[in-house]
Amino acid sequence: MNALTAFFAALNNPNVPFIRYALFAGLMSSTAFGMVGGIVVVRRISYVAGAISHAALAGLGASLYFSEVHAVHWLTPMLGAGIVAVLCSWIIALVTLYAAEREDTIIGAIWAVGMATGLIFIAKTPGYVDAMSYLFGNILLVGRTELRIIGMASFVTALTVILFYPQIQSLCFDETYAETRGQPTAFFTLLLYTLSAVTVVLMVSTVGIVMVIAMLTLPAATAGLVARRLQTMMVLAIALCALANTAGLATSYYLNVPTGPTTIILSGALYLVTLVLRTAAKRLRRGM
Amino acid sequence: MAQKRFPVVTARNLSFAYDTAAVLQGVNFTAYAGEMIAVIGPNGGGKSTLIKLILGLIEPTQGSLHVLGKRPSVARGEIGYVPQYTHFDTRFPISVREVVLTGCTRPVFGRHTKADKAAAAGALERVGLSDRALDSFAELSGGQQQRVLIARALVSDPSILLLDEPTANVDAFMSDRFLELVVNLATDRTVFFVTHDTGYVSEESDRVFCINRSLVEHPVAALRQDLVHATYSQPVRKVLHNKHIDTTHMTL
């Protein structure tokens, strides 16, 4: 039985639903990843996304702790991560917009303090907590509830980008000019950072906190190498993200290795190959 | 000409400071409809600050500034702005037409209408780039990109055009063609042209505003051709500010 047949057989196997869930999660979230990834890349805020994703560990840890110690069961890890991620994105955006503080300083602070807080909460949570599954992703984390949340959040994110596309494009291309046209740039900056936070949390369950930044930027950066318009870049990034998620899942199943890292390596390889091909094509054109 | 005497921008005792560092002090001027005003001065002298004040991006710390009789932030819709070339990512994935359309993007919500697209086509025609509308902005030369940015500023048909060092990234030939375009635009609107190139100041402008913390105004006739040419072999600001401008206002 070759690799693909084995993978499809596993997808149809009622005893291993988590593979189906992981596939659906990857495909559904690709829309948000591609759209927001495109924005993150052209606006050059990938390190903001990195800080948000690492700070999300504070929310994950807190939700585990309060759920175990104080029986706050409604506070799921994904919800906790989402709340903290959005709050952190607002802090970074507001400091960048209104305080005379360097953006890299606040990014570093949020990044480190968020992780530290999360690790302390996890340490104080009774019983065994597999922190590695949150740091590096684990497809077993995706259940029906997570799928519903991923589907809804991805839909809302995509809808927001579509509705405000002209304003977002204008802001990303030339923020000062957008301001001179009366655009509320602070509001849209907050909106973009919020969308980044929501997208980052969607990814945590599949690729983990540490590798979110790569998955958010690599498909979009690959698309950016060939696309000449932002909307084309977004559509291509969605397709590449879906491809990387599916191929990553299939490859990891076949090789019996973790899915998150496999997906990232495939995305990185795709980016490198595209970069080399594009550079070669440019040199050939110049030589002609 | 009566049309030229309609005041469009009026500054009275205008001052601006970042914290305690004064950037502009006691600036007074009136710009009239249809004028082309060159704004020159050394780096850090306050040229860009004046542009930001006219755009309403910053508020004066003292004095008043009115654009078409209104506060600048209220009159933004009447101002077309062409930023410095280094102001944004020139490799951004966007088409020429999309760049122009950002000049008439709804502030909060709404997509571009057919009228917007027609206005964008008209603006591109005016700058001679109709045939490049669907091309990628990143593929254009520096001079063409500047013309696209002019089209973006024109698409909302503004009464005032602010050009912040628009010829900084283009060669001499393109710079001349670019200036021809700007002069044509100045026939039906007021143009502020921030530049370091005094050749354009002498030949094409109605007046010259020399800015170095304060503002000294000169009619173009006062900038004699021989002296302007002499500036090309010397640092521009030195010649201008030592010979043409009341040096008591200048701190070089």
Image (spheres, coloured by chain):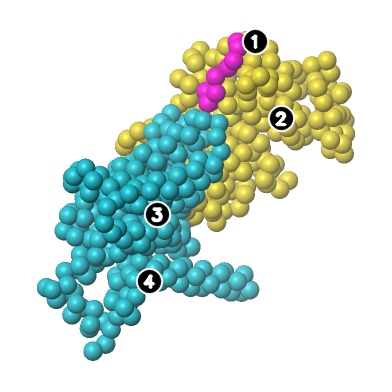
Chain colours: A cyan, B yellow
Residue B44, numbered circle: 2
Image quarter hosting the C terminus of chain A? bottom right
Residue B245 versus residue A172 in the image, above or below: above
Image quarter hosting the N terminus of chain A? bottom left
Q: Which residue is mark 1?
A: B13
Q: Secondary structure at mark 2?
A: loop
Badge 1: chain ID: B
**Residue A185 quadrant:** top left
Q: Secondary structure at mark 3?
A: helix
Q: Residue at x 53, y 26 (%)?
A: B57
Query: Are both tags, 2 and 3, on one chain?
Result: no
In space, the residues marked 3 and 4 are separated at their CA atoms by: 19 Å
Tag 2: residue type?
Answer: Gly
Residue B43 versus residue B211 in the image, above or below: below
Nearer to us: label 2 or label 4: 4
**Residue range of the region highlighted in magenta in the rendering:** B55-63
In space, the residues marked 3 and 1 are separated at their CA atoms by: 48 Å
First in sequence: mark 2 or mark 1? 1
In space, the residues marked 2 and 3 are separated at their CA atoms by: 37 Å
Tag 3: residue type?
Answer: Gly
Q: Residue at x 33, y 70 (%)?
A: A259
Q: Residue at x 55, y 23 (%)?
A: B58
Query: Looking at the image, which residue sits at the far left?
Result: A14
The crowd level at tag 4 (other Cα within 10 Å; few <14, some 14-19, many 20+) is: many
Query: Are both tags, 1 and 4, on one chain?
Result: no
Q: Residue at x 17, y 54 (%)?
A: A145
The crowd level at tag 3 (other Cα within 10 Å; few <14, some 14-19, many 20+) is: many
